[in-house]
Image (cartoon, rainbow, N blue to C red):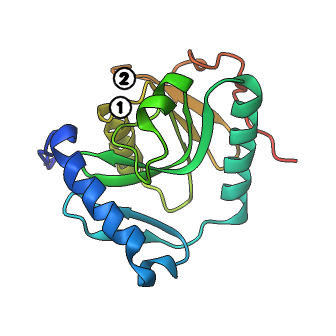
């Protein structure tokens, strides 16, 4: 039997998320925490230990490739995004100049940039990743990319039943990211 959770609309949740994220950023105890910090829809902190070095290497490589292939816009890492289930941090994101004008230099984006990328770790479950993909799309992402532990890339668009052969926004992005 599957459990279905009904989340509040992303726009409804955003005001709360932005307020809670500002509280967390102002908390000196939180500033000392190593690893990733996200929240759930209730504002409770979800912490993950620092990932393996290869995870950061994939983030850096994906960001560098995006920066070289999409010469306008901005590449972001550990990008905090307000979703219907709290604040989630995309490992890498890309926002067009138009999106950056709208999103500004906020500590937490009220909507997702056009591309959100997750570098997968051994601890990620399939259900967790499916949920994150759905949350990013609900928050406004145009594409969500997944980078497997071996560098293989999968590209998703909203409503697609399966992954695409490549990105529509960045068609020259490789199907596999190679680390140097």
Q: Give the quadrant of residue 67.
A: top right
- Image quarter of residue 20: bottom left
Distance from the alpha carbon under mark 1 to that under mark 2:
6 Å
Asked if marks 1 and 2 touch (Cβ < 8 Å), the reply is yes
Say if 120 sits above or below 115 in the image: below
Is 25 rendered above or below residue 57? Answer: below
Q: Which quarter of the picture shows residue 8? A: top left
Tag 1's secondary structure?
A: helix
Q: Position of residue 45 (x, y in %)?
A: 33, 70
Q: Nearer the viewer, residue 144 or 124?
A: 144
Residue 174 x/y as whole percent? 73, 26
- Residue under the point 26% across and 69% down: 44
Crowd class of label 2 (few under 14; some 14 to 19; many from 20; radius 10 Å)? some
What residue sits right under mark 1 in the picture? 137
Residue drawn at x 20%, y 55% is: 16
Residue at the image point whose x is 54% and y is 71% from the top: 35
Q: Which is more toward the observer, 151 or 109?
A: 109
Picture coordinates of residue 103 (x, y %)?
A: 43, 37
Q: Residue at x 15, y 46 (%)?
A: 7
Sequence order check, earlier mark of 1 and 2: 1
Q: Residues within 10 Å of mark 1 (few under 14, many from 20)?
A: many
Pointer 2: what residue?
Answer: 158
Q: Is residue 114 visible?
A: no
User: For the image shown, how many numbered marks are present on the structure?
Assistant: 2
Q: Secondary structure at mark 2?
A: loop
Residue 71 spot, x, y in % from top left = 72, 24
> Looking at the image, which is closer to me, 23 or 168?
23
- Is residue 102 visible in this depiction of the protein? yes
Position of 45 with respect to 16 (left or right) is right
């Amino acid at each position: 039997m599957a459990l279905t959770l009904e989340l509040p609309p992303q726009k409804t949740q955003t005001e709360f998320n932005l307020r809670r994220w500002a509280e967390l950023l102002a908390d000196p105890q939180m500033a000392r925490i190593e690893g990733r910090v996200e929240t759930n829809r209730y504002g409770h902190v979800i912490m993950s230990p620092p990932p393996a070095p290869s995870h950061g290497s994939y983030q850096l490589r994906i960001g560098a490739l995006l920066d070289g292939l999409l010469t306008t816009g901005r590449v972001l890492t550990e990008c905090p995004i307000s979703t219907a289930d709290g604040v989630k941090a995309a490992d890498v994101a890309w926002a067009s100049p138009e999106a950056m004008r709208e999103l500004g230099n906020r500590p937490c984006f009220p909507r997702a940039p056009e591309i959100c990328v997750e570098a997968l770790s051994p601890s990620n479950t399939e259900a967790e990743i499916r949920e994150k993909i759905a949350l990013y799309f609900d928050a406004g992402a145009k594409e969500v990319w997944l980078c497997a532990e071996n560098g293989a890339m999968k590209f998703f668009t909203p409503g697609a039943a399966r992954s695409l052969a490549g990105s529509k926004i960045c068609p020259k992005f490789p199907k596999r990211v190679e680390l140097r």
